[in-house]
Amino acid sequence: MSQWPVYTGASAPHDHVDALPDPPPWRAFDGGPPLEPPADTDGDGGAVSPDRVHRARTYQATEESVDLVNAALYLRRPLLVTGPPGSGKSSLAYAVARELRLGPVLRWNITSRSTLQDGLYQYDPLARLYAVRAAAVRATHAADPVGAAADGAQPVPADGDGGGDDGVEDHLRLGPLGTALLPYRRPRALLIDEIDKSDLDLPNDLLNVLEEGQYRIPELVRAARHTPRAEVMVDGGRDRVSVEDGTVRCRSFPFVVLTSNGEREFPPAFLRRCVSLRLRRPDGDRLERIVSAHLGAPDDYARGLIATFLDRSDAGELATDHLLNAIYLTGAAGLTGPSRDALAARLMPYLEGGPEAGDGDGF
């Protein structure tokens, strides 16, 4: 029986993702055979660093974000999250993965040089060439060790750096996007971080893969005549999965979060295929909840910093992280009076525009 919402934003992990209804007919996928996702043994959404663990546990979801996360899950569509730096865009992916027990979050950090293939898989043809040549040297030594020594050929140990199999799959690893699209029984969580830093073509290149829920690996397609099933490594570990005929097709469409700082516009075709969420500046009540989740109930001085933060936000963009830094450090440093106020001012700089950071005004 389905239920809404599957993701509640309440943080406590549960298995309600299994109660998702069948996808819309135009978003149904049939990849197989079904795979079990990696176990999230610590219950923290695969957030391997203490920072990510903490953010996943303390994330304060808004009603709008809960609704749109569930819309993306129900519709099997990517979630495009836009907002200023420090607004919790990437933390949302970890918070959802933790609550829904989606296993380790797959993360693809975008740069201006990122290509679609970087996200799907990486293949090292030079390493394969070296392995083939090393195997040929070993075969020569095995057939005619005396003649090979006379020719100056140096033996290569079977378990050495240059040894190993010369199959394509031994020099190929799936990327975060490629791994997320494997036919897992439950959706994987994929974070494509700062998509607006990409080359202009990348959003369009993503369209077909995210729409079809599948991709082909040309190197494995060419080898399929002799090796129809390849065992390839996945992103984030040493596990291997079977890929048949060089084609990967998902079964449960992954929970994909694409983050953007709002620094560029995206093609209408790309936006049409996403559920869009814009994270807005938190109000006073939500800031108090955020501070309480991270540092405990705010005292009078912290409430004063929250009020000043809101006043200064009217003149320029500020990051919530800076407010948390100011509240923590002004308490931990043991300062009082003007010194404490001056330190707090310097810890809450404007991201761009507005007055210069650290001018001391407003405190």
Image (tube, helix red, strand yellow):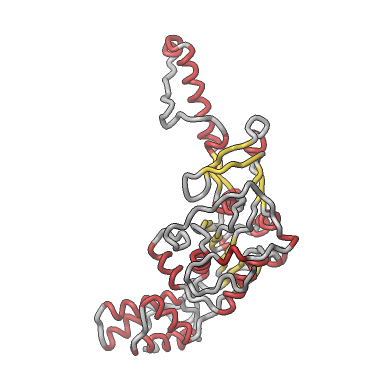
Q: Is residue 343 left or right of residue 351?
A: left
Residue 156: x %, y % from top left: 42, 24
Which residue occupies 64% across, 52% down?
250
The residue at the far right in this view is 25
Q: Nearer the viewer, residue 284 or 232?
A: 232
Residue 237: x %, y % from top left: 47, 48
Q: Is residue 130 visible?
A: no
Which residue occupies 67% across, 54% down?
213
Image vertical order of residue 140 relative to residue 213, above or below: above
Examine the image and state in which quarter residue 65 appears. Answer: bottom right
Residue 362: x %, y % from top left: 39, 89
Q: Is residue 349 left or right of residue 336?
A: right
Q: Nearer the viewer, residue 347 or 171?
A: 171
Residue 12: x %, y % from top left: 47, 71
Image vertical order of residue 363 relative to residue 81, above or below: below
Which residue occupies 39% across, 77% down?
324
Q: Nearer the viewer, residue 305 or 254?
A: 254
Q: Is residue 281 visible?
A: yes
Image vertical order of residue 264 relative to residue 210, above or below: below
Quadrant of the drawing holding the C terminus: bottom left
The residue at the far front in this view is 1
Q: Nearer the viewer, residue 103 or 257?
A: 103
Q: Is residue 98 left or right of residue 73?
A: left
Quadrant of the drawing holding the N terminus: bottom right
Which residue occupies 46% across, 88% down?
311
Q: Is residue 47 left or right of residue 189?
A: left
- The number of numbered badges drawn on the structure is 0
